[in-house]
Image (cartoon, rainbow, N blue to C red):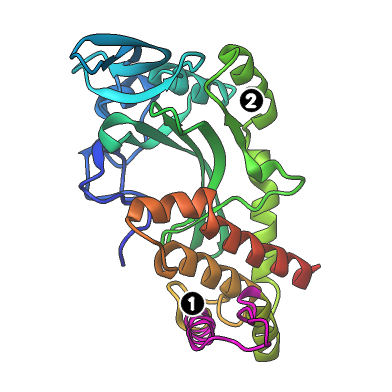
């Protein structure tokens, strides 16, 4: 099974990883245990800055003319242009991003599982493990804090909670109550220090933050789901295709919906980890069918990178969220 969190080799510039979860086979292996930021930033090849540089355009006569409204962001180590941004745009440097992540653990011992750069340095990520939960004996879910940042002028800094089911690498944003699972997003303008300080207060990382997600998973594992329950759930999860003005459904739309329902049903019955005692025939099996489909099977328009972004920020996340909400109603 291809790991959804593995970006294709063509897009990963540098990275470090510990163990084999959730990335493996690429980058600098640092051992079985996550490492602290001082080592991670070096091993991940992120010990550089993206600096402001004047931007020029060639006039019709071949003269260099300053572009006053924009500037380039240039990496200090190799002078690579990472992006073109507006004058008010301000970089959040890698060392500051690591520092922000470190500040979210009271004892200052945030340990990084993987980190690296994408798109020739235009985007970076950091993933730090902050706990785990055994939903059933032999069925563990690891909890992570994920940071995604860009130097391309398009990518805001995003920080959110992520769960990864160890047995199959199913990945989803943590199912936390009261909107806390949404994490935070920071644009690269204004007082960034103040924004990071406010974000620190909002996130307030501790093991208790994941209690909602862990408890929800255990409730799912304790809830039986009959074949009739599954059919009702699946029909709501993958709704009927849209109709035209005459009330007709296109053959393509009908086929797409039927195929999605069949594939998710197959994962509910025989998905990775379904053979673990206590999983089969439960709402937990349904949840993992949803997350496995989104992580590995749901169609995306292009690369694994797009699938990854969709899973955490886009349509893939929306799909998992819809399934999570339906299961929350089912177990209420």
Residue 142 in sight: no
Q: Nearer the viewer, residue 284 or 229?
A: 229
Tell whether position 16 is magenta: no
Q: Position of residue 261 (x, y in %)?
A: 54, 82
Q: Nearer the viewer, mark 2 or mark 1?
A: 2
Q: Which residue is mark 1?
A: 274
228 left or right of 190?
right
Sort mark 1 into few (<14), some (14-19) or many (20+) by Cα contacts within 10 Å. Answer: many
| Residue 325 sits above or below residue 70 on the image | below
Sort mark 2 into few (<14), some (14-19) or many (20+) by Cα contacts within 10 Å. Answer: some
167 left or right of 260?
left
**How many numbered badges does the structure rendering display?**
2
Q: Which residues are magenta?
A: 237-266
Sequence-first disc among 2 and 1? 2
Q: Position of residue 180 (x, y in %)?
A: 70, 41
Q: Which residue is mark 2?
A: 199
| Residue 230 sits above or below residue 115 on the image | below
Which residue is rendered at x = 60% and y = 50% of the image?
A: 174
Quadrant in which the C terminus appears: bottom right
Query: Residue 254's image quarter?
Result: bottom right
Q: Position of residue 329 (x, y in %)?
A: 78, 68
| Residue 203 sits above or below residue 292 on the image | above
| Residue 90 sits above or below residue 307 on the image | above
Quadrant in which the N terminus appears: bottom left
Residue 126 in sight: yes
Instruction: State how far apart marks 2 and 1 are (Cα).
Output: 38 Å
The residue at the far front in this view is 61
Which residue is rendered at x = 48% and y = 24% of the image?
A: 109
Q: Nearer the viewer, residue 275 or 128?
A: 128
108 left or right of 65?
right
Which residue is rendered at x = 30% and y = 63% of the image?
A: 2
159 left or right of 73?
right
């Amino acid at each position: 099974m291809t790991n959804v969190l593995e970006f294709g080799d063509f897009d990963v510039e540098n990275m470090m990883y510990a163990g084999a979860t959730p990335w493996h086979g690429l980058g600098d292996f640092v051992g079985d245990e996550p490492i602290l930021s001082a080592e991670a930033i070096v091993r991940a090849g992120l010990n550089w800055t993206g600096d402001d540089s004047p931007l020029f355009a060639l006039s019709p006569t071949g003269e260099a003319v300053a572009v006053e409204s924009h500037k380039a962001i240039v990496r200090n180590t190799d002078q690579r242009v990472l992006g073109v941004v507006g004058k008010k745009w301000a970089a959040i440097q890698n060392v500051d991003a690591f520092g922000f992540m470190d500040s979210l653990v009271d004892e200052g011992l945030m340990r990084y599982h993987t980190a690296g750069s994408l798109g020739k340095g235009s985007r970076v990520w950091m993933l730090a493990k902050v706990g785990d939960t055994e939903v059933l004996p032999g069925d563990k879910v690891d909890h992570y804090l994920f940071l995604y940042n860009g130097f391309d002028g398009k990518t805001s800094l995003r920080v959110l909670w992520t769960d990864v089911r160890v047995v199959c690498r199913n990945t989803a944003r943590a199912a936390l109550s009261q909107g806390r699972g949404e994490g935070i997003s920071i644009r690269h303008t204004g007082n960034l220090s103040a924004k990071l300080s406010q974000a620190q207060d909002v996130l307030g990382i501790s093991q208790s933050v994941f209690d909602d997600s862990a408890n929800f998973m255990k409730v799912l594992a304790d809830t039986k789901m009959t074949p009739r329950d599954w059919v009702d759930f699946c029909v709501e999860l993958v709704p009927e295709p849209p109709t035209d003005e005459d009330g007709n459904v296109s053959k393509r739309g009908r086929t797409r919906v039927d195929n999605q329902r069949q594939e998710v049903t197959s994962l509910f019955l025989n998905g990775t980890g379904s053979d673990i005692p206590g999983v089969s025939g439960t709402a937990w099996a349904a949840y993992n069918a949803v997350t496995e489909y989104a992580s590995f099977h749901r169609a995306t328009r292009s690369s694994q990178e797009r699938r990854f972004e969709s899973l955490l920020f886009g349509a893939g996340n929306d799909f998992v969220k819809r399934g999570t909400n339906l299961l929350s109603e089912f177990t209420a």
